[in-house]
Amino acid sequence: MKEIILILFSITILNASNDIENNSLSLLKALEILNTSNLEIQAASIDVDSAKAKEQSVSGSHWGKLDFIQDFANSNDAGNVFGFKLASREATFGDFGAREFMSAQTPTGFPDSAYTTPPQDLNYPDARNFFQSKLKYEIPLFTGFQISSYSDIMSSMTKMKSLDKDKVINEKRYQLRKSYFDMALLSNSIKNLQTILANIAKLEDMTNNMIEVGYAKKVDLLEVQAKRGNVERLVSQMKFNQKLLYHYISFLLNQEVTKIQIPTTNVEIPNIRDEEILANNLDIQRATTGLEVRRSMTDVSKSAYYPMIGAFGEVNTADDSFLGEANDHAAYTVGARLTWNIFNGGIDSSKVEEAKLNQLKTQSQVNLAKNGIKLKIAKIRTEIETYDSDVTSLQKELKLSNAIYKNYEGRYKEKLSSMSDVIIKQSEQIQKVLQLQQALNKRNERIFALEKLANGDR
């Protein structure tokens, strides 16, 4: 039974292992890992959560606030001691010096000194403790739409942070997809160069054989060996570029990647209309959200024209001991307050005008963003068409270069051309391979850029 459990556990572990451990990480799986593991995306997610928390804190202002206040004091200050007694409903006539006043009475009445002598009990009381427990609730009834406007601002800011996160995700997906297809192009170019290396090896063997029978010279062999070293150097550079790409993919996914599933080098042009790109573009959405913020800020500035109305209520109890005779000493207060600024030197109107101007400026920035994206779309589509034409032409040129090289290789064997001619044709062949790789790279990058404008392919 234990053995069966161990086998099932091992199978579960193997199935749970991702494609990285199997040394064959697909692009689809890599994109899934990117969304959860990329550090920049995680940071952007935290920014969104922080913005949501701020939005909730502003929205909570509608409900007012409830405070519990516990005071403790000890004083022999005359005003404080009398106030403490009064707050705890324990003030007496004796606190006013009534005993001293009555003791000054004579058979003929109260002398003038009784009215002018400061009472000792009132001015020099004994120190007294004071405990007051208070529950106070305050709520805004009308703020000139200020709180609701601030809530709208924070809601827009949350949306903006969410768009920022989408933009980070979009950018990282673009970089990851481009890295995968760059790897595919490098692999394809290495394959072509290795084919050329195989041809050079055959040419080197043929040259050695021709030297032995006196049909070729030592310098011919040196030319072939130099060309082989040149091609090997190019292959080595491409392999180092592959290694760098693996490091970059590992950085994007925040985990080590040693091998990926190479996609095909051909990237299809997305079938998406300009109107759809403009509707989905994150920069335009962000600019539009910024305009919403400006509108809400204009509403905030207009709130200065309205009165502010708030209400409050509190209950408390006080004594010279904590919660002593709490029910008997309890008290309450309820009330409301209206505050309305009538004149402040035109400051409010100036702020409203400034907010309106900022709103107009943001509106122009939204229009500019739309026009800028339209220009980018047109530019990218034109560049893709240009690179498509270049790729088609270079593929034909490479095919021709391969045929010409084969022809010159045969001509050299028959002593109809020199080794220099063969090497020149081989250099042209290698140049076409590199030019084709560069054209494909640029074409793919432009297609990914077009998808990025449309908020990716999610």
Image (cartoon, rainbow, N blue to C red):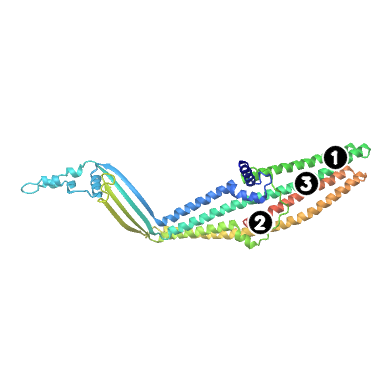
Q: Is 243 situated left or right of 139 in this image? A: right
Three-letter amino acid code of the residue under disc 3: Lys
Q: CA distance from mark 2 to mark 1?
A: 45 Å
Three-letter amino acid code of the residue under disc 1: Glu
Q: Residue at x 27, y 53 (%)?
A: 331
Residue 226 image point, x, y percent: 82, 39
The crowd level at tag 2 (other Cα within 10 Å; few <14, some 14-19, many 20+) is many
Q: Which residue is under mark 2?
A: 450
> Which is nearer the N-term, disc 3 or disc 2?
3
> Which is nearer the N-term, disc 1 or disc 3?
3
Q: Is residue 144 above or below residue 110?
A: below
Q: Residue at x 55, y 47 (%)?
A: 43
> Which is nearer the N-term, disc 2 or disc 1?
1
Report helix, strand or loop for mark 2.
Answer: helix
Q: Residue at x 78, y 41 (%)?
A: 232
- In the drawing, what numbered circle is on residue 223? 1
Asked whether 268 or 402 is in front, the reply is: 268
Total numbered labels placed on residues in the image? 3
